[in-house]
Image: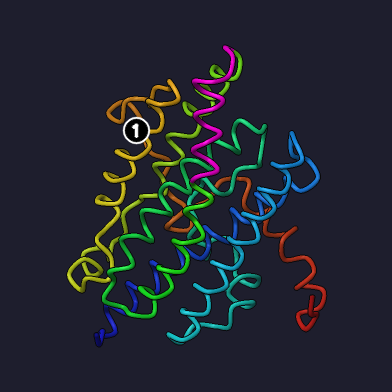
Amino acid sequence: MTHDQTSIKALKDLLYRMADDALIIAHRNSEWTGLGPILEEDIAFSSIAQDKIGHALALYTLLQQLGEPEPDISAFTRNEKDYTCCHFVEYPIGGYDFSLMRHFLFDSAELLRYEMLEHSSYEPLAKLSTKVRGEIKYHVFHADTWIVQLGSQGNEESKSRMQSALNECYPLALGIFEPSESEHILIEQKIFSGEQELENAWQERIQAICEKAGLTIPSRETITPIYGGRKGFHSDHLQPLLEEMTEVFQIDPSAEW
C-alpha cells in the first residue's frame, strides 16, 4: 500500500516510539548481567536484552529506509528530548521484584502490539512484526511463569512484594499507551489500530495472569497515567542512562564491536 507524506510522518513517530522503548529497556535489562538472583535469571534477562537490541536495530533500519539517519546515529546521537520512549523503560532496575513486574507489563503490551501490527498496511512493518512476535512470546512466557509462581505459589513475602511492585509499576505502564496526535492517521491508513485498542487488550491479558497470581490490579479510574515520554519530556533517569549508553560511540563513532 502506498502512503502519503502525512501518513509517513505518523508512521515514523510510531516506529521511533517502539525503537526507543526497545533500546532503553534493553539497556536496563542488560544491567542484570552478573546480578540476577539466580543464574538462570541472570541469563534470561541478558538474553531478553539482546533480543530487544535486535528489535531496536530492525526498527531503526525501517526508519532509515524512510529517510531517517542510519541506526547507530538514531540510537546514539540524539538529545534526550528527541527520544520518545515512555518513562517506564527509563527507570533503574531497582529490585528484582520491580524489574520482573516491568518485564511482565511491558512485554505483555509488546506482544499484543506486534500481533496487531502483523496486519499493518505498511508491509515492511507487518513482516517484521511476525518475526518479533515469535521472539517476544518467549519473553512473555518467562514473565508470566514467574509472576504466577511468586504470586500464588510463593510465600506471603513474595506475594506482597509482587503486589507492591504492581502498584508501583501500573501508572508507569499506562504511559506505554500515551496517545499520539497523529494516531487517527495511523488508524485511517490501517497502519496501526491505535493505543486505546492496544491498552484494552493489554488490560484483559494482564488481568487474566494477575488473577492466576492472586494479585490485584489497581483501579484504572483512580490512577493517573505517567505520560510525557512520547513527547520528549522524560524522567530524571534517562539522561544519565544515555550518557552511559552512548559513551563508546561518542569516543569513537567508527568503533566496531
Q: Is residue 151 magenta?
A: yes
Vertical comparison of 106 with 243: above or below:
above
Pick whichever, 213 or 166, lies toward us.
213
Q: Is residue 91 left or right of residue 30?
A: left
Pick whichever, 249 or 133, lies toward us.
133
Q: Is residue 101 left or right of residue 96?
A: left
Question: Which quadrant, please, contains the C terminus?
Answer: bottom right
Q: Is residue 117 magenta?
A: no
Question: Which quadrant, please, contains the N terminus?
Answer: bottom left
Residue reaching furthest to the top:
156
Residue at (51%, 47%) from the top-left corner?
87
Vertical comparison of 166 with 114: above or below:
above
Residue at (35%, 73%) from the top-left corner?
126
Which class describes the residues within 10 Å of circle 1: few (<14), some (14-19), or many (20+)? few
| Amino acid at pointer 1 | Ala
Which residue in the protein does label 1 denote?
Answer: 208
Q: Is residue 211 left or right of residue 69?
A: left
Secondary structure at badge 1 equals helix
Vertical comparison of 3 with 99: above or below:
below
Magenta extent: 141-156
Q: Residue 175 at x, y = what percent?
A: 41, 45
Q: Residue 182 at x, y = what percent?
A: 27, 66
Residue at (44%, 41%) from the top-left corner?
173
